[in-house]
Amino acid sequence: MISNFRLVLLFICIISANQKGFTQINFENFKLPIHKTTEKILIDGVLNETTWKEAEVGKDFFMITPIDTGKATQFSEARVAFDDEYLYIAMIFFNNSVQGDYVVESLKRDFSFGKNDNFLVALDPFDNQSTGFAFGLNAYGAQWDGTMYDGRSVDLNWDTKWYSEVKFDKEKWVCEIAIPFKSIRYDENNNRWGINFSRLDLKASEKSSWAPVPRQFPSVSLAYAGALIWDTPPPPQGSNISLIPYLSNNIIKQQTNDPYNSLKIGGDLKYNLTSALNLDVTINPDFSQAEVDQQVTNLDRFELFFPERRQFFLENADLFSNFGYRTIRPFFSRRIGLGVPIVGGIRLSGNVDENWRIGVMDIQTQQDGDLNLAAENFGVLSVQRKVFDRSNISMIFVNKQAIGKDENTSSQYNRNLGLEYNYFSTDNLWNSKILFLQSFGDDTDSQGSVFASHIGYQSTRWNWRVQQEYVAGNYDAEVGFVPRKNYNKLQTTGGHLFYTIKETKLLSHGPQLGRTYFFDTDFGKKDQTDQFKYLFNFKNRSRFSVGVSENFVELLSDFDPIRTQVATLKSGSQHQWTSFSAEYDSKPQNRFTYSLGALTGGYYNNGTRTAFSSEMGYRFQPILEVNTVANYNRIELPAPWNTNSFWLLGIKANLTLTNKIFFSNLFQYNEQLDLWNFNSRFQWRYKPASDIFLVFNSNEMTIPEVSSGWSLTLKVNYWLNL
């Protein structure tokens, strides 16, 4: 482990010392002045105001895909303006090269980027190439928004108040946007923001942007943004207080009990301490409208990850929940309020200045005497300091404290302290991380450490990554997500793409290879996986791949290979097998789209596994989108398991009557758990960020024990600016 650490540290030091030497496009050529207007701008998708006629134009967009070596064939224009309340953006997207029907899924918010003709704008108010905001529209006017972190990632769980309108005909589509300054965070003294505009045109199978972006990166990558130049500084936000009260009534039926009513009143308060630092307070929060989790067939030995969907935890979530790696998270907000209500919480988050970010969170849960659960307090402190051009050093402290501890409850406290250094090169090609965590608890069994690091490279043709992890057996993160402990891990992956020169349907193809080792902390080998995959990427955005994997596993504990409690394989037993796989994703331009996958090969205990997965969708654009999931696993093992097969079926219908009225229905059947689930959710956004929800949930499950119930919820919230 020490030698791996030294090697990674050497790589990072070399790269950091030479990061200015990377070749880059001169983005000083991509400046768009923004001027203040005194004219009343009507957000109607018709650019007839004098402001738009006089505004400077960002045009001559560059193609990102299928090739990134020239100008876009479909022309686009961007204009910007502002007044004391709003940042205005106007876009015109011409169909000068290819005409045809626009492609959209529906009018639902936060649509799938690759399945819609759409526009995105990335805003970097601190010009730090790391954090910001992204807004977008599809060609029928559905909204898309999120917070940006790590310079190119977008968290779509964030919602804010803004206004937009779209008009289109065969020759072009036009969008007009007004973003309240109170809806974003920025430095009032900064007269240079990072900005880029991008367009995805599925008719032409072309993605383009105003400032050029290499095709291996997302179009909103802040390392490749241009500059928005303010002739006068953006207006101060002034007093910015929002009160969001709610009222909900739940009718709940559990098992054989009679239905009962549960009336809840609560709300959220948002207060901007500065234009970039926000204070959130929640009292008696209710999350009944959050989307349900997608069912999966679970054949894994370790806990599965499901994302956070509750609104209170989402703004600046990267400060808290993205610390570490996907399977080494010292803080995972879904651990809070699990089975017991949250009384209230407070959170301070945002930018102190262009170099410092801070996040502070404190949440209190109730005591549950019937379940013998103590009240608990959860506190998190996160501080991030920008270094070099795009890198940062972060610290996190997580505290879980029982209040009124009973002898049958869990530990009195659990704490985690962590430090990490994230490196991103100026040109986005190199990235790396060094992470250290230490846990503290009531006894030595919960006082352990973690050390992990990686270095990666991603160019147009080459990509590779080396990662190592060490997690002590006594490391304990009760408010985190660390499904596996007591291991050393070394993982290497690499790939290359060959791009076609001739005019063919194939855009690129190439191999991907990977090897993953897991050792215990005494370096005894426990797992090894070798993978080879060959990819084919087509110009119409469809994809195909074939692969083979070799697997070796020595079980760390008793394990049921079908997870239905039939029997278990013994800890320490060794298993080895080979699997073959193939996957295909259809082009998104068709109204009928699908993804298919197949796997066949060995399994634990000299068994065999055959699996098939499919996702199919059809859109009656823009009103109705229907998606289905059908996964099948057939596993043959010796007695007592014998032959078992599991279906996972799901169908989801999204009815979007307007971009303010949404009606979604999700039905799922998981044969492995013998679980039936139905979720129906009606949402009317009667005012920006103000909603009426009517939600029905029904569940019936047999494994591991019989349980059933249903609930019907009516919830109303209102966003009030004070």
Image (cartoon, grey):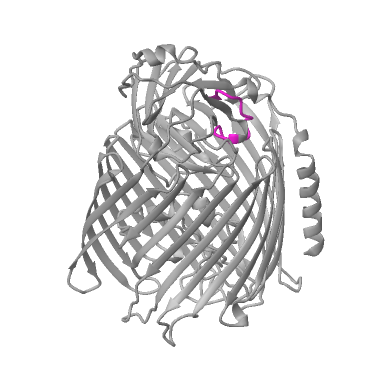
Q: Position of residue 226 (x, y in %)?
A: 58, 27
Q: On the rendered image, what quadrant is the C terminus found in?
A: top left
Count the labels in the image. Answer: 0
Q: Is residue 538 left or right of residue 6?
A: left
Q: Position of residue 518 (x, y in %)?
A: 70, 65
Q: Is residue 564 left or right of residue 722?
A: right
Characterize the magenta stretch by its predominant secondary structure: loop
Residue lying furthest bottom in this view? 407
Q: Quadrant of residue 193?
A: top right
Does the stretch in magenta take in 621?
Answer: no
Along the viewing direction, whichever of 421 and 557 lies nearer the viewer: 421
Q: Bounds of the magenta span?
A: 208-222
Against 166, residue 324 (above or below) is below
Seen at 59% across and 77% down, the residue is 446
Q: Position of residue 214 (x, y in %)?
A: 64, 30
Q: Quadrant of residue 106?
A: top left
Seen at 52% across and 56% down, the residue is 320
Does the image show residue 75? yes
Q: Quadrant of residue 218?
A: top right
Q: On the rendered image, what quadrant is the N terminus found in?
A: bottom right
Seen at 31% across and 21% down, the residue is 40
Does the stretch in magenta take in 216?
Answer: yes
Q: Position of residue 522 (x, y in %)?
A: 75, 74
Seen at 17% across and 72% down, the residue is 258
Against 662, residue 324 (above or below) is below
Against 291, residue 472 (above or below) is below
Against 606, residue 186 (above or below) is above
